[in-house]
Image (cartoon, helix red, strand yellow):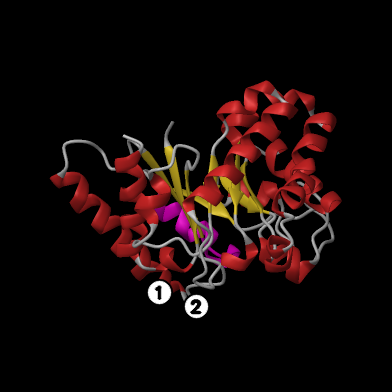
Amino acid sequence: MQAWVIGNWKQNPATSHDVDLLLNDLLTTIDTKEQADTEPSNSRCQLMVAPSCIHLAAVSARLAGSSILSAAQDVSAYSASVGAYTGDCSAQQIADAGATWTILGHSERRQYHNESHDTLLQKMIHALTQGLGVVFCIGETQAQYDAKQTLEVIDAQLLVVKDLLAQQPELIVSLSERLIIAYEPVWAIGTGKVPTVNEVSQTHQHIKQTVTGFAESLKVMSVLYGGSVNADNADSFAADSMIDGALVGGASLKVESFLAIANAFSQAKG
């Protein structure tokens, strides 16, 4: 199975100039590596970046023709196309801007925007019906982890996928290729705290078993880990068969660390 390493840039960089510098560095480094290697760098690991919405069209245009995909960080829950929803960007607009994927359900969206089950279900329907793939984030808080409620929380969050299939059964055939689950324990995002590889592996196994229970075709769906993934610990996560890649935050803003993570997964999954 091909690995995925996805960079969530969040509300970074601040300016278009800095975005250009980051992309220049990323593309130049990849091009240099591909010229030195006999095998393309993306053959075992698909790279993707998710810039802020204001930079999405420019980033997508710049990456067109490269091996790197672009994704949005969110879509509107209210309409898949247009409407009187000030501040929102629809799935159709995001696809038109050149993105092919979107991140949904990130813990920061859940926390700061109070995103509910029904909200996330509508966002997922809008994204998929407009041809976007979805990276769906799930994970527990520190209090829930301490109370040993991780699997209970994850099961509740995964019900969005179950309800999606109930409402849109025609998506079953293609969903394994258009849906990625990213397990991100909230207590590990940007904190430096990291669960053990065994903990993550067992959680990923549970996720895969759960979604396969929704639809047999989802048994091949990719499940990524996110939460303080960096160049130093990527090898240990990549070596585990249950971990199909990484959703990377701060480390994705530094090309050297982002590509080191990608290389770890490329080597491990080769």
Which quadrant holds residue 180? top right
Which element carries disc 1, helix, strand or loop? helix
Image check: 116 left or right of 267?
right
Residue in view at x 79 percent, y 41 percent: 159
Disc 2 marks which amino acid? Ala
Which element carries disc 2, helix, strand or loop? loop
| The stretch drawn in magenta includes residue 200 | no
Q: Nearer the viewer, residue 31 or 172?
A: 172
Residue annotated with mark 2: 14
**223 above or below 62?**
above
Is any part of residue 49 visible from this angle?
no
Disc 1 marks which amino acid? Asp
- The image quadrant where one finds the C terminus is top left
- In the displayed orientation, state which residue is furthest to the bottom: 14
| The stretch drawn in magenta includes residue 52 | yes
- The image quadrant where one finds the N terminus is top left
CB atoms of marks 1 and 2 within 8 Å: yes
